[in-house]
Image (cartoon, helix red, strand yellow):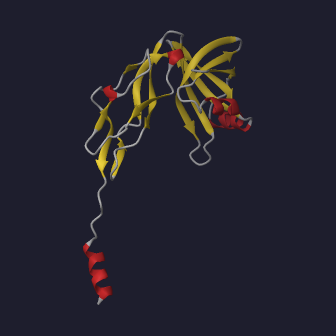
C-alpha cells in the first residue's frame, strides 16, 4: 500500500465562516484523532487530498508542524452537488497496529450460461489488517456459478495478514435466475383490442 505525504497546518478558527475561507483557499478542514490524544484541527491541501482519497483506505503521512504522524481516512464529507471535499476525519494509526476497515469486493469470471443475475448483497467487507498493509480490495471468482449459488464472507480469499471482521456466514454475493415479466392484464387487453 502506498503512503501519501501531506503537509498539514493546525487551525485555530472554527465555524462555517472559517471553513468557507479555508475552502476558498483550495484547502480542506480536517480533524485528526485517536490513541487517546485530544483531537487536532488541521487544514490540508485540497487537490493533493482529493488525489490521495481516490485510493480506498489510503495511508496518509501527515507533517503537522514538523511532526510526522500516520493516519487513515475515517469519514469524508463531500458537497452534495459539486462533489468537493467539505471535511475529513482522520484516525491516527501506528506501524504494526491492527485496524478495522471496509474493503471493496470485486468479482472476476463469468456466470454459467443462461439468464442469471449476480446480486451484490454486500459491496464491502469489514476486515482487520495492519495499518500499513491495508488491502485496497478483495477479489472473488464467480466463474460458472448458477442460480441459487451464493458466496459467503468466509469463502472470500483474504490477503496474508488480513482477517475477517464481518460475520463469516454473511451472504456477500448470490446468483438469481432472471425473471421474465409476465404481461399485465391491462396490456393483454390492449393488445386484444388492437387486433380487433
Q: Residue furthest bottom?
A: 196
- What percent of the width, then of the height, locates residue 161? 43, 14
Side of 33 where 46 appears, left or right = right
Instruction: Judge left or right: residue 191 versus residue 128.
Output: left
Instruction: Examine the image and state in which quarter residue 178 appears.
Output: bottom left
Image quarter where the N terminus lies is: top right
Q: Write the residue at 30% across / 61% down.
A: 180
Q: Position of residue 71 (x, y in %)?
A: 57, 19
119 lies left or right of 135 = left
In the picture as drawn, the residue positioned furthest to the top comes out as 96
Residue 9 in percent (x, y) is at 70, 21
Left or right: 38, with 168 as reference point: right
In what quadrant of the picture does the C terminus appear?
bottom left
Residue at image coords 34%, 26%: 166
Name above or below for residue 68 compared with residue 190: above
Residue at the image point whose x is 61% and y is 37% from the top: 86
* Closer-to-camera residue (32/58): 58
Q: Quadrant of residue 153?
A: top left
Tag count in the figure?
Answer: 0
State which quadrant residue 12 falls in: top right
Give the residue drawn at x 38%, y 24%: 157
Q: Position of residue 90 (x, y in %)?
A: 55, 23
Amino acid at each position: 500500500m502506498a503512503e501519501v505525504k501531506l503537509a498539514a497546518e493546525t487551525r485555530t478558527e472554527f465555524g462555517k465562516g472559517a471553513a468557507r475561507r479555508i475552502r476558498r483557499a483550495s484547502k480542506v478542514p480536517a480533524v485528526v484523532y485517536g490513541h487517546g490524544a485530544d483531537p487536532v484541527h488541521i487544514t490540508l491541501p485540497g487537490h493533493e487530498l482529493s488525489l490521495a482519497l481516490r485510493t480506498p483506505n489510503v495511508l496518509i503521512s501527515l507533517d503537522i508542524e514538523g511532526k510526522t504522524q500516520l493516519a487513515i481516512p475515517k469519514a469524508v464529507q463531500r458537497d452534495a452537488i459539486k462533489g468537493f471535499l467539505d471535511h475529513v476525519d482522520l484516525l491516527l494509526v501506528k506501524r504494526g497496529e491492527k485496524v478495522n476497515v471496509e474493503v471493496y469486493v470485486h468479482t472476476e469470471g463469468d456466470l454459467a450460461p443462461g439468464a442469471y443475475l449476480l446480486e451484490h448483497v454486500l459491496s464491502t467487507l469489514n476486515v482487520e489488517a495492519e495499518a500499513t498493509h491495508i488491502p485496497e480490495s478483495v477479489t472473488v471468482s464467480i466463474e460458472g456459478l448458477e442460480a441459487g449459488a451464493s458466496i459467503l464472507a468466509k469463502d472470500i480469499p483474504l490477503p496474508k495478514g488480513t482477517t475477517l471482521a464481518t460475520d463469516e456466514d454473511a451472504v456477500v454475493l448470490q446468483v438469481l435466475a432472471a425473471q421474465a415479466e409476465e404481461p399485465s392484464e391491462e396490456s393483454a387487453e390492449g393488445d386484444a383490442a388492437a387486433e380487433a
